[in-house]
Amino acid sequence: MPAIAELIRTFADRKLMIRRSLGELYESIREFVVATDDEGAIIGCAALHVFWEDLAELKCLAVAESVHKRGVGRGLVDACWESARALEIETVFTLTYVAEFFEKCGYRQIDKAELPHKIWNECVRCPLFPSCHEIALIRSVGEAPSWSASAAPGVESGTEQVVRTLLTAVEA
Ligand SMILES: CC(C)(COP(=O)(O)OP(=O)(O)OC[C@H]1O[C@@H](n2cnc3c(N)ncnc32)[C@H](O)[C@@H]1OP(=O)(O)O)[C@@H](O)C(=O)NCCC(=O)NCCS
């Protein structure tokens, strides 16, 4: 866990990620996936935090700069998605400054306000709240999540319908 803490710290110092204490990381140790090099050293990490039966957050994603742009980040994002699917969780969201990277990994941007209130517990403890500029993205197996406004009958826009149909096709 110290290696994960150090990896996250290098980016948190540059305000690219939220700082995490060792205690906080140990409490969530079972949520982490890591990537290692040939010597077994940790070169990347990510965590999947379950919020509800159909919703989880991908967080703490970090890849050592020495191995950027070699597919490690995508591998970690995919591993978290597989973990979510193994738990039959249909939607994973993330709050990030690297929206383009997540879009390349199959996520799509949504309005932060669409996320359910229960996810803001951690944010309200952050010094940047409420003026941080993180972007919300989700990946979903196809159906609109039960907490989303677009799940309510009669409020679905044409664009959302098309996006959902495309997502269903991609997942099939
Ligand atoms: C963002 C991060 C995890 C990407 O890791 P990575 O291992 O370099 O990413 P990958 O090599 O798997 O890249 C997958 C694709 O995304 C692209 N990509 C990678 N970083 C990107 C970025 N910052 N912005 C836009 N696209 C990016 C890659 O070029 C690649 O595209 P391709 O499929 O067209 O070739 C890594 O840069 C990082 O740790 N950044 C600092 C911490 C951070 O911002 N974490 C996210 C907080 S939620």
Image (cartoon, rainbow, N blue to C red):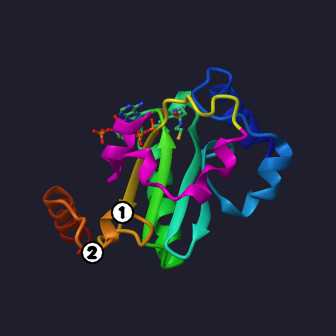
Q: Residue at x 54, y 54 (%)?
A: 58
Q: Secondary structure at mark 2?
A: loop
Separation (CA) of disc 2 from disc 1? 9 Å
Residue 29, percent from left and from top: 75, 58
Q: Secondary structure at mark 1?
A: helix
Q: Which label belongs to residue 153? A: 2
| Residue 24 horizontal side relative to residue 152, left or right | right
> In which quarter of the view is residue 100 placed?
top left
Number of disc labels = 2
Residue 87 versus residue 165: which sits nearer the camera? 165
Q: Residues within 10 Å of mark 1 (few under 14, many from 20)?
A: some
Check the image and name the residue furthest to the top: 14
Residue 33 is a magenta residue: no
Q: Quick check: 76 above or below 10?
A: below
Q: Which label belongs to residue 149? A: 1
Residue 72, percent from left and from top: 48, 45
Type of amino acid at the residue the image marks with label 2 = Pro
Q: What segment is highlighted magenta in the picture?
A: 98-125
